[in-house]
Image (cartoon, rainbow, N blue to C red):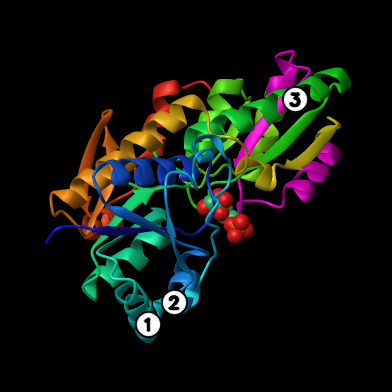
Amino acid sequence: MKIRKIAILTSGGDAPGMNTVIWAIVNCSQKKGIETYVVYDGYKGLAEGNIQKITSADVDTWVKKGGTKIYSTRYPEFKDEAVRKIAKEQLDKHNIDALVVIGGDGTFIGAKLLSELGVKTVGIPGTIDNDIPTTDLTIGYITAIETVTDALEKIRDTLESHNRAAIIEVMGRYSGALALSAAIVTGAEGLSIPERKLTEEEIIETIKQARNNGHRSIIVVVTEKLYDVKALANKIQELTGIETRGNILGHLQRGGSPAPSERILAVRMGVFAVKQLIEGKTGITINSVNSKMVAIPIEETVTSERTNLVELLEQYDLVK
Ligand code: F6P
């Protein structure tokens, strides 16, 4: 069946580069004579029929914009089949032939369930967490590394001025990918991630050792959800006498304009998605594997094993 109308939605946590993908899909589709629609507010907007036609003129500056211009929600109600059936009816009402969803694993599960109802879906990985196992890179991750690096280096300036240590919490949900990359590129003295969680005693030992080695500023990067970083910092200070602060980077990690290399990835993924749809391929995710664009069944993407970060960490063998 010829694809005439494609709809796009973003879901879950926003990520730099989401707008770039939309920009690419809209422009590429227009060149191929395909109409494009956006669904505002993710799956919630889909169920509510918040769908609008969009052209390249509407997205002219989106290539560089942070966040998601078509908004996003977390919408657990989508687990309900009755809600998904309503969502399908909304697409049918607009005669939409295929739906491209941009987001993380929760978004992909939604797409998989929709495709089981007969909706032609394509998933594009967009999350700062880089936790989609079938792709080397998710859109948003490269920019988030830059953002976190910048924040860590600024904090390091202050740590050095004041002869302090800091426990710095980085996002990532259940993946240590972002924390690991940021720790490597900033030369952090310590790292604790879900895949290799340090005990509080090990963190204290790491800080003491760094101080014994003459480090004035000491950074221990930790993934969110592992510790109460403020309480841990207080405990370290009490036990070691080393002045220590707990910092939570929070949502500053998700915003901002996508880095140039992020935009390149986003454009490649968006254009590849449109081409796959034209070739009649659906029920897939778009992945970057060894720098090549690869389509993989959604089912496989959502059931694959996570990348072994401990192995990766051992390759660096620098941070404790
Ligand atoms: O998935 C992106 C992410 O930023 C995670 O790193 C984090 O755990 C989560 O989203 C936070 O979600 P929210 O913005 O809904 O609090």
Q: Quadrant of the N terminus?
A: bottom left
Q: Distance between the Cα atoms at labels 1 and 3?
A: 48 Å
Q: How busy is the neighbourhood of tag 1: few (under 14 within 10 Å), some, or many (20 plus)?
A: some
Quadrant where ligand 1 appears: bottom right
Disc 1 designates what residue? 86
- Please tell me whether residue 91 belongs to the stretch shown in magenta: no
**Location of residue 24 by image quarter:** top left
Give the residue drawn at x 20%, y 52%: 277
Which is nearer the eye, 165 or 97? Answer: 97
Disc 2 designates what residue? 47
Which is nearer the eye, 6 or 218? Answer: 6
Count of numbered circles in the view: 3
Q: Earlier in the sequence, mark 2 or mark 3?
A: 2
Contact between labelled residues 3 and 1, with CB atoms less than 8 Å apart:
no
286 shown above or below 217: below
Write the start and end of the magenta stretch as one range. Answer: 210-239
Q: Distance between the Cα atoms at labels 2 and 1?
A: 6 Å
Which is nearer the eye, 188 or 93? Answer: 93
Give the residue drawn at x 74%, y 16%: 215
Contact between labelled residues 1 and 2, with CB atoms less than 8 Å apart:
yes
Give the residue drawn at x 19%, y 47%: 276
**Location of residue 211 by image quarter:** top right
Q: Which residue, as the protein is rendered here, is positioned at the far bottom? A: 82
Disc 3 designates what residue? 154
221 shown above or below 79: above
